[in-house]
């Protein structure tokens, strides 16, 4: 009976190679692997034909999703190779780390205790224990040291013995504050090993982080461990496979710190010979793809430089650092800019894994994957833009699916506005983040399919939300997501809120998105009958209470009202309902003619009436005269003017009568009154575009005479030819000339 | 020797090179004085086994020096690139001294540098008297370096005309220099290579042609990362220059160096050291080399016009001179800096007053 302890570095391709070789040599009859025991049942999926690393085991607490741990695996992870070996050779493999159930529960307890006790002293900065060895060997960086000594070597005999020896020496001689959780973990690992021994396995291979090896070698009495592990707290934990990405591998996970260069590891794992040459060829191809000229001679020179530098540094072969430095020097003229391209595309590399559909997963996840497959929307790590034509059935389905996900808070797709394509086109940017798998589990409480979850989610929102404008914007989402049940719930909620609402401004704020919804509803073939009934009733309510809402309001409220007025007018004209328009005119007249209305709103109402051509210029002049007459307070007159002129001043340029009225009014103002209204007038005119303002200025300066701009003649102007046209033009303009210009 | 203003690196550091050579066990490329590791140790400074201390020549990233040295062992030439005053020529001189034992094979690139000063020229008296012969040939530093297997240095490569630059292509790729007039050629002996320097913020430079670029590995020498590193550089250089120039004044206090380096870094980065105030950036490069020369002129001022110890007033003129390169724009920038940053610092009152006294 023998126990083989294989100390590895998580995600180290060299370790992976060694583990594979070692397992093939000793042929163990069981493998014990550092990892969550809850996931034992998931292991059989590892060799499934649709399983593509990078993938991760996600262990989560179903009723508290803040608590979750990922155990990622890449192709080049020693853990993954151990799993594959066990499946190929049909030997059992067990995870032997402290169960996540305990781990998370312990963490929770610690956090709670922390809250109670007095804040401790600041933690001492932790030093990576391997740094001691690295520094003795003359390295600045522990990772680099490990890489050169254990990952990158050609002779690998007895490597695990050396690792073992090094770590034992380290653990004996350094004072690393031992955490309680580490002790639990190692005790649990020993327990699992003992269990395997009891079950009469002959050759037990233990694959774990190098740091744990000494603790598993010198077994203390079983009693102590049992004592230690007694009565550990526990939470309920579930596990599932999720796709992972290389960029996420660089994050901290259940296996501790992440790795910085997954793409590079992928390369060395998959390349048996000429690692540097093949890597630099990839670099060169990447550069060429980006229109940067790199010749084969460059590759040759880079390889040579990298090899010389690694020789100079005393390494057996170039590592990533040497290759990068050589690339920068030979291919990039010493500049760093291009290196970031290599970093993104090759060193990290945008690779995303896949998990078989059949593997056990939360039902919502299964449904999402099914739809993704149906609609041919594969997951990508890179950002990808798709443009949908909503007249196509499949694109329509895609749009609905993406809208549903985004209202559930799974932000896979972000909608982008497409210009000039009308309402039939929609553009989305898709970017999958493995962290979505947690969101998906979280939203699982709402239902087992996307449609069901989205419906239930919105129905529950409908019953809780009290603000009309929020509900109406949710309604828009709901219509876009084609959720009839939720739409019904939202509509009836809107109806009851609108009926109860005494605040006309709230109704006005809610209207634009309802009208929008009505319009989109047509494109999306949804039944909008109820919606239009509700819109009609809201509009009716607004028309009734609007005139009184415009009475005696202060300036801020008036300004707010004015903005709502603006969009209300848009909505009404968008609907093109004649009866409604007539009511709208009446409302406008009521507001404009009531002298107690807020002057700002009254001015705007007058303007709208004029725009609808319900007022001829004579009547308009009267209205103007009334509003600007000396009896009216100057500040009121100015704000009336502001309301009237909102949006555009062109009317002043065209209509000389109006211009005269305003001009006169300004002229009659006394100095101190003028100073009073000046800020208001300035606010009005500052909204106009530059050319408009310039023209107005010119008009004011020349008191009504518009100037024509003179086109300067270009150098190749033919003077004689031009002269020929002059008589005709003069005749057209009605100017008679006595003298002959020619 | 005593009367020479400035000695070559291989003269000044002869003892260090000698000791390194004795201790150097690494294998040496042909015609190299030291092994590549030895060269890196010479540049970065080290303590030898017998306790001999080798002073650091380049303060900064060791990895850059390793790339530079490794390049010279291959058949590619080395191009040191960077802002003015980032020790390009300094590194080039020491590399040549440590590798070939001489840093004197140097061609200065200018707009007027001709092909003759790179390839070879003719002694016209001889040429007329004897006709074309080896004796009438005037060797250039590059040609000598080829014959002797040494490092040739080319300063300010990009200041030369493009046609002149391109004469280097054959020399670098074929390692040969044809002399068609004599129907012969000079073939480079092992150990020959070229170190060129060029700066990337100069006006009126001639970009390297693609063909020539391909013959060079480029190392960009950056400005010092941290204020500590920069102060260290200024301190070492000021000390050694003060000694060399026999300036009879005290070595400036670290405090004084820190202030000058702070001013330079703040104006260069456009941000005060505490990261709280933005500062406009003047048009000059404000390199470490300029900070060194400010300290030096301050020392000279103190020695000959003052009492031998450096005062703020001795430095003010130098600082103003290196900051204000454009008499209009930079003056405004400097005044703003003076009023908003320098004035606010309690222990900088003397500098503020000294600068105001200069009329700025």
Image: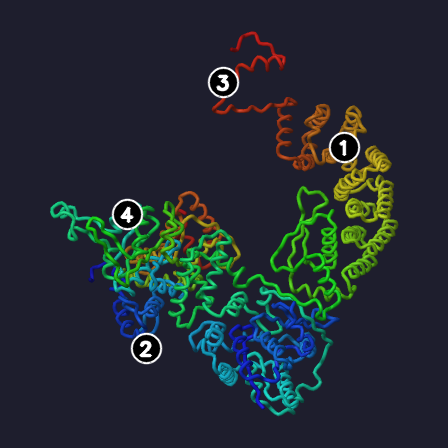
Residue A428 vs residue A490: left or right? left
Q: Which mark is residue B49?
A: 2
Instruction: Label 3: state its secondary structure.
Output: helix
Q: Are marks 3 and 1 in contact (CB under 8 Å)?
A: no
The answer for how far apart the CA atoms under marks 1 and 4 are is: 77 Å
Mark in front: 1 vs 4:
4
Residue tagged by mark 4?
A: B113
Mark in front: 3 vs 1:
3
The answer for how far apart the CA atoms under marks 3 and 2 are is: 93 Å
Percent x, y of residue A369: 71, 62
Instruction: Pick out the residue farthest to the left.
Output: B129
Instruction: Label 1: state its secondary structure.
Output: helix
Percent x, y of residue A311: 38, 70
Q: Chain of mark 4?
A: B
Q: Are marks 3 and 4 on the same chain?
A: no
Residue tagged by mark 1?
A: A607
Against A444, residue A468 (above or below) is above
The answer for how far apart the CA atoms under marks 3 and 1 are is: 49 Å
Q: Chain of mark 3?
A: A
């Amino acid at each position: 009976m023998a126990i083989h302890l294989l100390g590895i570095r998580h995600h180290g391709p060299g370790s992976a190679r060694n583990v594979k070789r070692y397992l093939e040599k000793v042929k163990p009859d069981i493998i014990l692997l550092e990892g969550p025991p809850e996931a034992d049942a998931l292991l059989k999926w590892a060799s499934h034909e649709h399983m593509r690393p990078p993938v991760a085991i996600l262990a989560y607490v179903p009723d508290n999703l803040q608590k979750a741990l990922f155990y990622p695996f890449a192709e080049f992870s020693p853990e993954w190779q151990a799993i594959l070996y066990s499946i190929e050779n049909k030997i059992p493999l067990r995870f032997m780390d402290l169960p996540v159930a305990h781990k998370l529960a312990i963490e929770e307890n610690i956090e709670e205790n922390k809250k109670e006790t007095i804040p401790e002293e600041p933690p001492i900065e932790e030093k990576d224990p391997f740094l001691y060895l690295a520094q003795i060997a003359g390295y600045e960086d522990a990772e680099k040291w490990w890489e050169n000594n254990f990952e990158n070597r050609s002779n690998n005999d007895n490597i695990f013995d050396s690792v073992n020896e090094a770590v034992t020496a380290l653990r004996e001689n350094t004072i690393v504050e031992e955490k309680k959780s580490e002790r639990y973990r190692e005790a649990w690992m020993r327990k699992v090993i003992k269990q395997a021994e009891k079950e009469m396995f002959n050759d037990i291979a233990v694959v774990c982080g190098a740091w744990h090896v000494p603790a598993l070698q010198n077994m203390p009495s079983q009693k102590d461990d049992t004592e230690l592990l007694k009565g550990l707290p526990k939470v309920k934990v579930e596990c599932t496979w999720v796709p992972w990405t290389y960029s996420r591998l660089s994050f901290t996970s259940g296996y501790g710190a992440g790795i910085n260069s997954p793409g590079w590891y992928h390369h060395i794992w998959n390349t048996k010979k000429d690692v540097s040459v093949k890597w630099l060829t990839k670099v060169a191809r990447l550069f060429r793809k980006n229109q940067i000229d790199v010749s084969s001679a460059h590759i040759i020179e880079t390889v040579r430089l990298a090899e010389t530098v690694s020789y100079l540094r005393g390494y057996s072969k170039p590592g990533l650092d040497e290759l990068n430095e050589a690339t920068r020097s030979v291919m990039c003229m010493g500049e760093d800019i291009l290196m970031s391209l290599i970093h993104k595309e090759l060193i990290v590399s945008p690779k995303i894994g896949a998990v078989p559909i059949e593997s056990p997963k939360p039902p919502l996840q299964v449904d999402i994957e099914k739809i993704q497959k149906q609609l041919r929307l594969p997951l990508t790590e890179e950002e990808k833009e798709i443009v949908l034509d909503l007249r196509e059935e499949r694109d329509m389905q895609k749009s609905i699916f993406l809208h549903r996900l985004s209202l559930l808070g799974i932000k896979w797709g972000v909608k982008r506005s497409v210009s000039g394509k009308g309402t039939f086109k929609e553009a989305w940017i898709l970017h999958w983040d493995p962290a979505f798998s947690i969101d998906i589990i979280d939203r699982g409480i709402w239902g087992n399919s996307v449609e069901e979850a989205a419906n239930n989610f919105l129905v529950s929102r409908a019953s809780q939300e009290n603000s009309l404008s929020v509900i109406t914007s949710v309604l828009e989402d709901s219509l876009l997501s084609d959720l009839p049940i939720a739409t019904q719930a939202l509509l009836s909620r809107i109806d009851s809120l609108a009926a109860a609402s005494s605040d006309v401004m709230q109704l006005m704020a809610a209207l634009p998105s309802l009208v929008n919804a009505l319009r989109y509803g047509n494109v999306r073939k949804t039944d909008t009958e109820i919606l239009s009934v509700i819109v009609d009733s809201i509009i009716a309510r607004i028309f009734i209470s609007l005139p009184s809402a415009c009475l005696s309001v202060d300036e801020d409220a008036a300004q707010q009202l004015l903005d709502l007025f603006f969009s209300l007018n848009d909505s009404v004209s968008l609907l093109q309902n004649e009866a409604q328009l007539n009511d709208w005119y009446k409302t406008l007249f009521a507001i404009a003619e009531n002298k107690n209305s807020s002057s700002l709103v009254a001015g705007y109402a007058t303007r709208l009436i004029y725009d609808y051509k319900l007022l001829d210029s004579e009547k308009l002049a009267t209205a103007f005269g009334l509003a600007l007459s000396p009896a009216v307070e100057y500040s009121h007159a100015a704000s009336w003017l502001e309301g009237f002129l909102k949006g555009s001043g062109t009317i002043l340029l065209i209509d000389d009568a109006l211009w005269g009225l305003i001009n006169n009014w300004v002229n009659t103002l006394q100095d101190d009154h003028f100073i009073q209204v000046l800020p208001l007038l300035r606010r009005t005119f500052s909204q106009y575009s530059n050319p408009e303002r310039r023209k107005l200025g010119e008009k004011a300066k020349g008191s009504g005479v518009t100037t024509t701009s003179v086109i300067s003649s270009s150098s190749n102007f033919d003077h004689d030819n031009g002269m020929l046209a002059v008589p005709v033009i003069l005749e057209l303009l009605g100017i008679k000339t006595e003298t002959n210009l020619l | 020797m005593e009367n020479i203003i400035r000695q070559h690196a291989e003269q000044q550091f002869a003892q260090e090179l000698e000791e390194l050579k004795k201790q150097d066990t690494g294998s040496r490329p042909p015609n190299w004085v030291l092994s590549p590791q030895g060269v890196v140790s010479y540049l970065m400074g080290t303590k030898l086994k017998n306790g001999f201390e080798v002073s650091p020549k380049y303060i900064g990233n060791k990895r850059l020096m390793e790339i530079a040295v490794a390049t010279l062992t291959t058949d590619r030439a080395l191009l040191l690139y960077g802002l003015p005053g980032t020790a390009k020529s300094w590194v080039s001189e020491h590399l040549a001294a440590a590798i070939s034992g001489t840093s004197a094979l140097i061609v200065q690139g200018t707009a007027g540098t001709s092909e003759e000063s790179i390839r070879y020229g003719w002694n016209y008296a001889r040429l007329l008297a004897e006709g074309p012969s080896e004796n009438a040939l005037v060797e250039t530093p590059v040609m000598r370096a080829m014959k002797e297997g040494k490092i040739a240095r080319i300063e300010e490569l990009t200041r030369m005309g493009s046609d002149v630059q391109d004469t280097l292509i054959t020399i670098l790729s074929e390692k040969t220099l044809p002399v068609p007039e004599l129907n012969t050629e000079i073939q480079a002996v092992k150990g020959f290579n070229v170190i060129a320097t060029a700066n990337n913020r100069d006006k009126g430079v001639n970009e390297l042609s693609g063909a020539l670029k391909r013959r060079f590995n480029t190392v960009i020498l950056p400005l010092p990362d941290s204020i500590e590193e920069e102060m260290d550089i200024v301190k070492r250089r000021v000390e050694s220059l003060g000694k060399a120039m026999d300036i009879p004044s005290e070595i400036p206090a670290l405090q004084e160096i820190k202030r000058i380096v702070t001013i330079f870094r703040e104006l260069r980065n456009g941000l005060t050291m505490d990261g709280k105030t933005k500062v406009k950036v003047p048009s000059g490069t404000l390199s470490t080399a300029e900070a060194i020369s400010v300290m030096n002129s301050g020392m000279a001022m103190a020695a000959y016009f003052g009492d031998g110890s450096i005062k703020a007033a001795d430095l003010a003129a130098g600082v103003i001179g290196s900051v204000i390169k454009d008499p209009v724009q930079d003056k405004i920038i400097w005044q703003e800096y003076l009023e908003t940053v320098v004035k606010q610092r309690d222990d900088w009152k003397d500098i503020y007053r000294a600068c105001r006294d200069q009329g700025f």
